[in-house]
Image (cartoon, helix red, strand yellow):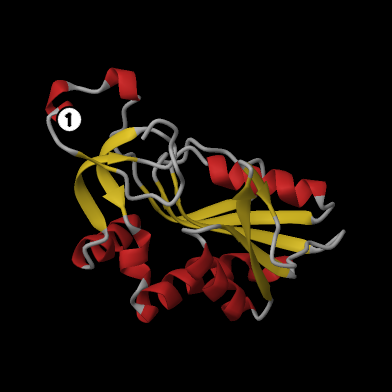
Amino acid sequence: MTSEQILDIFKKTGAMLEGHFVLTSGYHSPHYFQCAKVLQYPYCNSMFASAIAEKFYDKNINVVISPAVGGIVFGTEVGRQLNVRTIFSERENNVMTLRRGFELGKGENVLICEDVVTTGGSVFEVIDLVKRSEANLCGVGFIVDRSNGEVDFGTEQFSLAKTEVIKYKEDELPEWLKNIPVTKPGSRDIKGK
């Protein structure tokens, strides 16, 4: 599928929102990808996951890990299709960590899966977690690349759709965006919001 076809699915399922949003990265944008709205449809989740699983099939993946919360549903489906263990990381005291008895074994082949990447902050945190565990990072797969290819994870990476969405730092907001009420739909708390 092309980027345009993927983005069209987001529009048709109401998962591409318009307004004034504070992204997980802290940037403000008039657009937001609410992946949960598209992934609530099993055929969409399965179709997206299939493309990622196919891309990394030859890497002999042992485990798929996703950052909580956004990547969990998608990463679990990728893991199911690869028939491998799936886990997720979460923040504890602002540090990305493994909880709930999850572990990464030394030398395990790991695929990181995420729903949307803007700055890649959560994925970089998971990469550090994989390295600290002495596991082998085999790649990063994600649905939407909001950086339009600018974020480089230093490993093989694959996104289903690339788009550059307008984003602003809080102190650089244009007047037209300031006049729209702010919504913070992401799952991570932003200081001062």
Tell whether 91 sits left or right of 115.
Answer: right
Q: Name which residue lies at 57% across and 38% down.
A: 152
Q: Whole-percent x and y of residue 119? A: 48, 37
In the rendered image, is residue 61 in sight? no
What's the amino acid at mark 1?
Answer: Leu
* Residue at horizontal 31 percent and vertical 33 percent from the top: 28
> Looking at the image, which residue sits at the far top?
171
Front residue (pair 188, 133):
188
Q: Quadrant of the N terminus?
A: bottom left
Examine the rendered structure and indicate whether residue 4 appears above or below residue 183.
below
Q: Quadrant of residue 16?
A: bottom left
- Image x and y of residue 179, in percent: 12, 29
Where does the image place residue 2, in percent across and percent down from the top left? Answer: 35, 60
Residue shown at the point (19%, 47%) measured from the top left: 18
Q: How many marks?
A: 1
- Give me the residue at 77% from left, 63% from top: 109
Callout 1: SS: helix
> Would you say 77 lies left or right of 134 here?
left
Q: Please tell me whether residue 142 is drawn above or below residue 21 in the rendered image.
A: below
Q: Quadrant of the C terminus?
A: top left
Q: Is residue 44 visible?
A: yes
Q: For the residue carrying disc 1, how many other residues have a C-alpha within 10 Å: few (<14), some (14-19), or many (20+)?
A: some
Q: Which residue is mark 1?
A: 177
Q: Toward the viewer: 180 or 5?
A: 180
